[in-house]
Image (tube, helix red, strand yellow):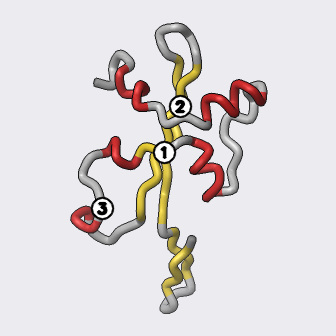
Amino acid sequence: MYLYNGNVGIAIPDQFFQVLITKDEQDEYITAGFLFPHVKERSDLPYTELIDYLVPVDSIETVSGLDFFQQLADPKENDIESKTNIDFWKLKGFD
């Protein structure tokens, strides 16, 4: 998961992520996770659209070793983190 710069001994991640949570119109939690490759130039990205980097939050937890939204009850946490929520972008203010 890391590239190493041998000249200065710094670990450089080969991916980075963003995780978002909000509530929908029914006051239910909805999440979105994005997983991006770490590239030198924007033109090196495999996709041009942000939506193409959308992944379930569970996927980000797997690669990062982090546990997001652990303050929610496990059934709710497992449910919202397992989905790829394209509907997230249909919420007011995100279109």
Q: Tag 3's secondary structure?
A: loop
Q: Position of residue 19 (x, y in %)?
A: 52, 41
What distance separates the C-alpha of mark 2 from that of mark 3? 23 Å
Q: Residues within 10 Å of mark 3 (few under 14, many from 20)?
A: few
Picture disc at residue 94: none
Q: Quadrant of the C terminus?
A: top left
Q: Tell us which disc is closer to us: 2 or 1.
A: 1
Could you tell me which residue is drawn at 54 percent across and 41 percent down?
56
What residue did someone put label 2 on? 31
Residue 24, placed above or below residue 72: above
Marks 2 and 1, how far apart in space?
10 Å
93 relative to 64, above or below: above
Q: Which residue is mark 1?
A: 55
Q: Earlier in the sequence, mark 2 or mark 3?
A: 2
Residue 63, percent from left and from top: 61, 58
Q: Secondary structure at mark 2?
A: strand
Identify which amino acid the numbered label 3 is placed on: Pro
Q: What amino acid is at disc 1?
A: Val
Residue 46: assigned label = 3
Q: Position of residue 20 (x, y in %)?
A: 51, 35
Task: Report the side of 69 relative to 34 (left or right).
Answer: right
